[in-house]
Amino acid sequence: MALDDETFGLLRDSVRRFVRERLMPAERVVEELDEVPADIVEDMKQLGLFGLSIPEEWGGIGLNMQQEVQVAYELGYTALAFRSVFGTNVGIGSQGILIDGTEAQKRDYLPRVASGELIMSFALTEPDAGSDAAALKLRAVRDGDDYLLSGTKRFITNAPRAGAFTLMARTDGAGAGGISAFIVPAGLPGLTIGLPDKKMGQRGTKTADVILDNVRVPAANIIGGVPGKGFKTAMKVLDRGRLHISAVACGQARRILDESIAYARERRQFGQRIGDFQLIQAMLADSQAELLAGWALVQETARRYDAAAAGLVGAGRSDPEVALHASATKLFVTEALGRIADRGVQIHGGSGYINEFAVERFYRDVRLLRLYEGTSQIQQIIIGRALVGPSPG
């Protein structure tokens, strides 16, 4: 699935204008209110941002991965809270249904997700199971044609806004093979949402606990209709999510670098622009080089993803080479962004520590990108294991 080049060019240009003319002027409002204004959310729906990755047959725009990363790059140029409003619909909230769901599940959910009528959230992490996703404890016990779900999910993005969750629960035994993926409507009896988390950065984004106490969910709500496949579904979803986040990180790096260049041209010390000092130029140069390298890596890995999804190489979206490249991309780009943000603050000097300047906010915001969709250390483990291979015997 993909848009033709001309149509996609128009969409990308529209998103770029929307970011610069609508979202960037509202960044401070979001920071102060800790909320994305409702009228901006409606504008996002009209632009089709909730359905970027959902095929046209289900009411979305139907971007392939190479196109999605370009749009994500544009969206990364502004405060990350804006993208977060629809990010779970585009990625981890809906992709499990799209990749592994039954036709009935796709028909029932995807059109509402694509329009923004329904916010989907991805509920995997638990108080004692984050990086070790196979260790999750939330139980799903069979009861006739239903399952009773009990346990807690933690740090769930868009939980306060969600109308339904793609939720991983243990239906059998230990390990990854006992995990099933459920579609859980938010309004079911016994399901409650905790207070929104107070985070270091990304004000305007919403994360919270999701608490389930004997929540009755039909067995028909298991994604794909077969229990025990949830861990594999989650891993497939995360490959695409990691690429999307990597592209957002590149967009954020571009914004921080642009802010830093502008400040270096305007700020004067010792009778000249600070941008004329070689040590400032060196920091800008390092940031530019890392941005170019990261963005090239994102685009190449997106190409590999699309080739795999089209069946040209390997076994599609679960191709191990794609997973390795997606992890390497997220590791490199988000770590580089951390360094670029740090240099941005350093170039601004004392002003970089003051909330009046965008780099102070972005410095706090981007720290999260090295944690979610798999920490940098988890990416290192994935890459290292793939390179070494399984132990003999």
Image (spheres, rainbow, N blue to C red):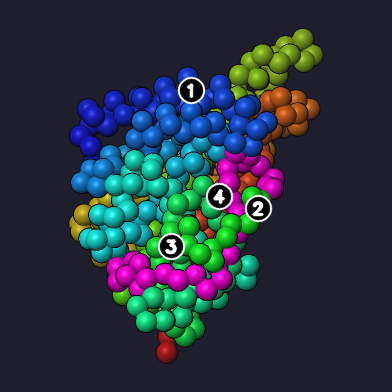
Q: In the rendered structure, find residue 195 and report the number of the disc placed on it.
A: 2
Based on the picture, tell me whether residue 377 belongs to the magenta stretch.
no
Which amino acid, by three-letter code, is at mark 3? Val
Q: Earlier in the sequence, mark 1 or mark 2?
A: 1
Q: Which residue is mark 1?
A: 22
Secondary structure beneath disc 1? helix
Up/down of 110 relative to 253, above or below:
below
Secondary structure beneath disc 3? strand
x and y, in percent, of residue 217 in the image: 42, 69
Q: In the rendered structure, find residue 184 and report the number of the disc placed on it.
A: 3
Secondary structure beneath disc 2? loop
Residue 164 seen in render: yes
* Residues tagged 2 and 4 counted as in contact (Cβ below 8 A): no
Which amino acid, by three-letter code, is at mark 2? Leu
Residue 329 seen in render: no
Q: Earlier in the sequence, mark 3 or mark 1?
A: 1
Which amino acid, by three-letter code, is at mark 1? Arg
Which portion, as a residue range, is magenta? 198-225
Secondary structure beneath disc 4? loop
